[in-house]
Structures are given as structure tokens and as C-alpha cells.
Image (spheres, rainbow, N blue to C red):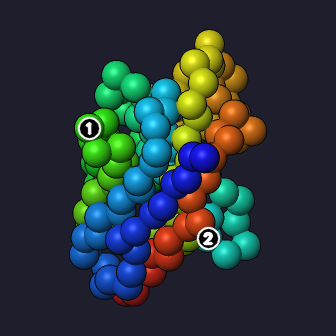
Amino acid sequence: QVQLQESGGGSVQSGGSLRLSCTASGFPYCMVWFRQAPGKEREGVAAIDSDGTTSYADSVKGRFTISRDNAKNTLNLQMNSLKPGDTAMYYCAADFYASWRSCRSDVGAPGTRQEGDFGYWGQGTQVTVSS
């Protein structure tokens, strides 16, 4: 049974860094980090497909880096220059099926995977950034 397990969340001051990790059993075609802040909709933050192609939300571009270690079945999200607006619960999600839809952070956009395509989710890890 596929399981996703996040780690690495915590509290940090504005400008600080955190590194999130997600271990997955298997080799997903597409993996995405989502986040959801209180009172806001869940949004895709960063995505990476099976050949290492990455995609980022404009709000995190240049500050966050997504990577995957296929040998260790691990997905990482390096978050630098954190801002209070990055405060949210962060989730990793995986799609183990090939799809004509692109693997991009703008989940739900035309031609991009939908949230329902991600059959496996982690339990979430909290990131809190104080000013």
C-alpha cells in the first residue's frame, strides 16, 4: 500500500529557511507540494515529474526548490527567504499514473493535472513563519 509521509515543518522567523521531505513507496509520475492556509483554498506550490522537470507557483519562484531522489523515494522542498504569507499546512501528493495532463504546480488549470488525479496524500506538516 502506498504511503506518503512528510517531515521537516516547524516555526521560523521571516527570512529563514526550512526543508520539507516526503517519502513515498514507489515511483510516482508526478509529485506536487500543496499548501493550505487557514481560510484559504489549497494551492499547488511546486511540482516535479518523473524526468525531473519542475514547476513553481509565482509566489514561491526563486525562493523554493523542489527535488526528488528516486533512489530513496524522497521528495524535498527547500524553502528559503520565508515570509509570513508562506504560513500554511503543507502536503505532498503523488500521481502514480501516466497522464496526458501536465505535471505542473498550477493544478487544475487547463491541460494540467487536477487535484483528483493525485490519489495519494501525506498527512501534512505545519510551516509557521513569524515576522
Residue 20's image quarter?
Answer: bottom left
Does residue 46 lie above or below 41 as drawn? above
- Residue beneath the point at 60% across and 24% down: 97
- Residue beneath the point at 68% across and 41% down: 119
Q: What residue type is labelled 1?
A: Ala
Q: Nearer the viewer, mark 1 or mark 2?
A: 1
Does residue 114 lie above or below 93 as drawn? above
- Is residue 52 found left or right of 122 in the rendered image? left
Does residue 48 lie above or below 57 as drawn? above
Q: Whole-percent x and y of residue 44? A: 56, 47
Q: Whole-percent x and y of residue 57? A: 47, 44
The mark that comes first in sequence, 1 or 2, is 2
Q: Circle 1 sits on which residue?
A: 71
- Residue beneath the point at 41% across and 56% down: 22
Quadrant of the image containing the C terminus = bottom left
Q: Circle 2 sits on which residue?
A: 37
- As measured in the structure, the alpha-carbon distance from the residue carrying label 1 to the one carrying label 2 is 32 Å
Residue 85 appears in the picture as rendered: no
Q: Whole-percent x and y of residue 23? A: 41, 53
Q: How many residues crowd around disc 2 within 10 Å: few (fewer than 14), some, or many (20 or more)?
A: some
Residue 88's image quarter?
Answer: bottom right
Q: Report helix, strand or loop for mark 1.
A: loop
Given residues 31 and 24, the one toward you in this image is 24
Q: Report helix, strand or loop for mark 2.
A: loop
Return the residue found at the far top: 100
- Residue beneath the point at 71% across and 59% down: 41
Does residue 101 lie above or below 72 as drawn? above
Q: How many residues crowd around disc 1 within 10 Å: few (fewer than 14), some, or many (20 or more)?
A: few
